[in-house]
Every structure is written in C-alpha cells, then in structure tokens.
Image (spheres, rainbow, N blue to C red):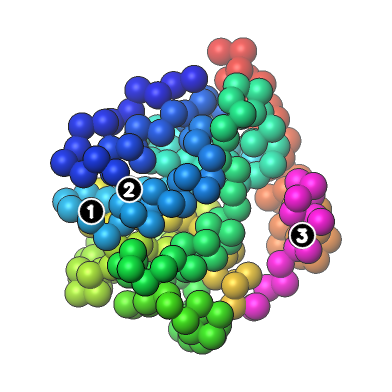
Amino acid sequence: MNDRYRTSDDNPEKARLLSSPRVQVAGIPVVARPAAEVIALIQRVAPGLQGSGIPVHFVNAYTVALTEDERYLGVFQSDSLNIADGTPLAWLARRQSDQIAHMRGPDAFRAILSSAPEFGVRHFLLGGTVGSLKRLEAVIAKEYPDALIVGSFSPPFRDLEPPDHQQIDAMLRDADANVVWVGIGTPKQDYEVARIAAGHPAVVLAVGAAFNFVSGDVVEAPVFWRRTGLEWVYRFGREPRRLWRRYVFGNLRFLLLAARRHRG
C-alpha cells in the first residue's frame, strides 16, 4: 500500500484527505479509505481551502484503458484523489486493501449535494447544455433544497482553449465556488479537473454522466445492475451504437493493461 502523498499543509483536514492511503491498480493510485470518510472529509475541507484545490477522479475500466496515453496517466499520478468507480477496478484494489473507497460519480454527487448547510459548501456545475443545466438545477432545488448552487456553465463541446479556461476561471472566482462538478466526458473532464484544481481553491470532481442521471435526462441503471457490477451491461443494452467501442474495446484494453502493469 502506498501512502506517501503530500501531508504538509496549513489546513490539517486537507492534509488528512490528501494523505489518504493508496493502492496501485493498473498504474493508478486508488484511494484506500472508506467512501463515507472521503465524502465527510470533502464536506469539511472544501469551504476552508486556500490557494490550490483538490482534484478528484472517478476511475473505471475505460479510464484505465485510456491511460495508454502517458500524458493522461500522469493526471492520476499527482496529488489527485482517485476513487474506484468501476466494479472490476474495485475488485482488483480490494486484493490489496479492504478499505477501498468504491463509489460511483453520481452517488458522490448526490451525497455532497445533501451536505448540511452549516458546512458552507458552494457548488458550481460545469458541463452539459444550457437546457440540461436548467433541468438539473430545477431537480436539485426540489430534491436538495439546502444545496447552494452558486453558478453553472455549459462549455463548448470542442476541446477547450485558453480563452475558455479564462472564462471558466473568472466565473469560479466570481461565484466563490468551493466544490466544482465537471461533467464534460472522459478524458476531457479529467484534464480540466486537474487544471482547475491547480489554480482554484476548491474540491474539483470529474463526475461523467452524473448530471444526466440526476436530472433524469438519461435513465440510470436500476440498483441491482449497479450493485452487481453490471451497470455497463445495462447501459450498453440501452445505447449500443454510442457505447459499443467504449465497452468492447475499453474493457479488453483494461484487462491487458492491468495484466501488463501488474507484471511490470
């Protein structure tokens, strides 16, 4: 188990969160701390952050498959918190520790939206379309009335450029956001999470399809499929033309990479 991560910080709760033990899974250091503890620490840490933030990535088989790109792999090998999202990844991690934080991005989204007001969490939503963000904010206002949404932005669907980054950074500063949710697709969102966290004092989380699931724009897999690790089968069955490459080639590449890096 690898726990040699940054611990010196003026904020002891931030240091505690960043020093969470990790285990190596297919070249990615995965947090080995119970998910409930991670969520509780995020709730306490976010409002008091200064200077830089904390990047949080939810890692699954597809994420690992894309780390054949060394630049992308580097995103997960800094001070980021990498949470085991996919069940196969969690299975491998649990061979090394029984304390693995196994949590889906949408579940973390819901859990932190439920934070008590006294925590002082200020949410910013980055991703989706203008219309989908409006629907999402309406659902949040109804189901999570204590959640404070201080801003939202629908970025361009192309690769983000320096003027886009400047606009996003200005919006985050003006909103004084301390929790930033990024749902712009993998791997784009992971790069953006790392970039934002490097310069903005917030917990910044890459949450994939969480916006679509919580808003109801996309039907979420029933609990049975999620708990048995077969959510990908359910999603593939509903959207085969869009997801076949991700799941067929992604899962195969994940297995090959995991085996190769384990041997290495």
Residue at 76%, 46% in the rendered image:
229
Residue at 57%, 32% in the rendered image:
99
Name the amino acid, label 1: Leu
Please say if the residues under marks 1 and 3 sit with CB atoms less than 8 Å apart.
Answer: no
Crowd rating for badge 3 (residues with CA inside 10 Å; few <14, some 14–19, many 20+): few
Residue behind mark 2: 54
Mark on residue 49? 1
Name the amino acid, label 2: Ile
Residue at 43%, 55% in the rendered image:
205
N-term-proximal mark, 3 vs 2: 2
Measured as percent of width and height from the top left, residue 60 is found at 61, 43
Quadrant assignment, res 226: bottom right
Q: Nearer the viewer, residue 117 or 107?
A: 117
What range of the chain is rendered magenta? 216-231
Residue at 65%, 78% in the rendered image:
216
Residue behind mark 3: 223
Crowd rating for badge 1 (residues with CA inside 10 Å; few <14, some 14–19, many 20+): some
Measured as percent of width and height from the top left, residue 235 is found at 76, 60
